[in-house]
Image (cartoon, grey):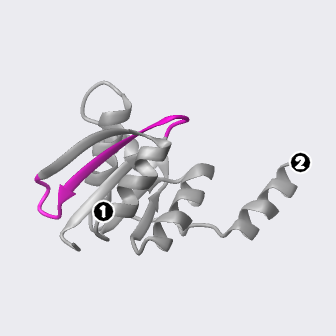
Amino acid sequence: MKDTMIGVDLAKSVFQVHGTFMTGQVKFRKRLSRPQFYKFMADHPSCAVVMEACGGAHYWARQMVKFGYEVKLIAPQYVKPFVKRQKNDAMDAEAIVIAAQRPEMRFVEPKTEEQQARAVLFRA
């Protein structure tokens, strides 16, 4: 299902998932716990998945690649202009999809486990 794009707003315990067709028409909106999110993504047909780049997003990107998804990460400062109303997780997930559909959008390459481990050493 390459006609679908899923935007995911990651949080500590609950993830907001916003699915749209490539035309921009909303397909679904869901609020899922971590186990529910994992099961939902494992059962869903492969498509494009977009998340804001953060430490957790790199982990989830690696998991989604294992399921056969095309994963894109966007730097948070590029998503912020697309939040329409008051900021909450559901609006963030929608803004992630809208930002990703822009042809001029730049994406962050997901890091491997080794790259993330090395980054921790530089911070310490």
Badge 2 amino acid: Ala
Q: Is residue 111 above or below residue 86?
A: below
**Front-most of 13 and 90?**
13
Q: Residue at position x 52%, y 54% from top?
A: 53
The quadrant holding residue 106 is: bottom left
**Vertical position of residue 68 compared to residue 57: above or below:** below
Q: Residue at x 78, y 59 (%)?
A: 119
Q: Report the side of 119 relative to 100 (left or right).
A: right
Residue 65 coordinates in the image, percent (x, y) = 48, 72
**Image coords of residue 71 (percent x, y):** 43, 67
The three-letter amino acid code for the residue at tag 1 is His
Q: Total number of numbered labels?
A: 2
**Residue 96 lies within the magenta run:** no
Q: Residues within 10 Å of mark 2 (few under 14, many from 20)?
A: few
Quadrant placement of the N terminus: bottom left
Q: Which residue is mark 1?
A: 44
Residue picked out by circle 2: 124
Q: Is residue 110 left or right of residue 102?
A: right
**Left or right: 78 with respect to 95?**
right
Where 94 falls versus 101 (above or below)? above
Along the polypeptide, which appears first: circle 2 or circle 1? 1
Report the span colored magenta.
11-25
